Amino acid sequence: MESVTRIKVRYAETDQMGVVHHSVYAVYLEAARVDFLERVGLPYHRVEARGVFFPVVELGLTFRAPARFGEEVEVRTRLAELSSRALLFRYRVEREGVLLAEGFTRHLCQVGERAARIPEDIYRALSVLHLK
């Protein structure tokens, strides 16, 4: 399954050249990931309220073309890997079909302050998505 999150580029997100600063893409990926989980019935604020967290342990991005102030970009998000303790999301940032950036985030399940197995109900919900 893939979700599409639309984001309007704000002026504050651009650098002196008028291009979205590379650091902002991590924020775009987070917004898209939270949106993805919301759409599949796992609102992240509710997951965290249970004491379950999925911190980012690895982030990778490759930039292909710039995004600029006022443009609308689409972040395409999919769950690419799932194990008993970790998730890997893949992303494509596009503007009108043009690839701007692609990347991934890897997340480790944490319950309280310790690494842990993904709770069974969350794992089941994610495993169905991973197969699509």
Image: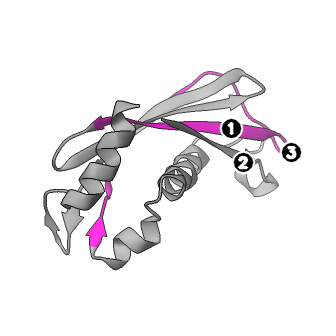
Label 1 to label 3: alpha-carbon separation: 13 Å
Identified by mark 3, the residue type is Gly
Res. 119 image quadrant: bottom left
Q: Between 8 and 5, which is closer to the camera in this rendering?
A: 5
Question: x, y (%) of residue 84?
Answer: 16, 47
| Looking at the image, residue 108 lies above or below residue 17 | below
- At 52% across and 28% down in the image, what residue appears? 102
Question: x, y (%) of residue 65?
Answer: 68, 23
- At 74% across and 34% down in the image, what residue appears? 67
Q: Are marks 2 and 1 in contact (CB under 8 Å)?
A: yes
Identified by mark 2, the residue type is Ile
Q: Nearer the viewer, mark 1 or mark 3?
A: 1
The local secondary structure at tag 1 comes to strand
For the magenta stretch, what is the residue range?
52-81
Q: Are marks 2 and 3 in contact (CB under 8 Å)?
A: no
To which residue does mark 3 refer? 70
The answer to whether one can see residue 28 in this image is yes
The local secondary structure at tag 2 comes to strand
- At 17% across and 50% down in the image, what residue appears? 85
On residue 118, which mark appears? none
Q: In this image, 34 relative to 104: left or right?
A: right
| Looking at the image, residue 118 lies above or below residue 28 | below
Count of numbered tags: 3
On residue 74, which mark appears? 1
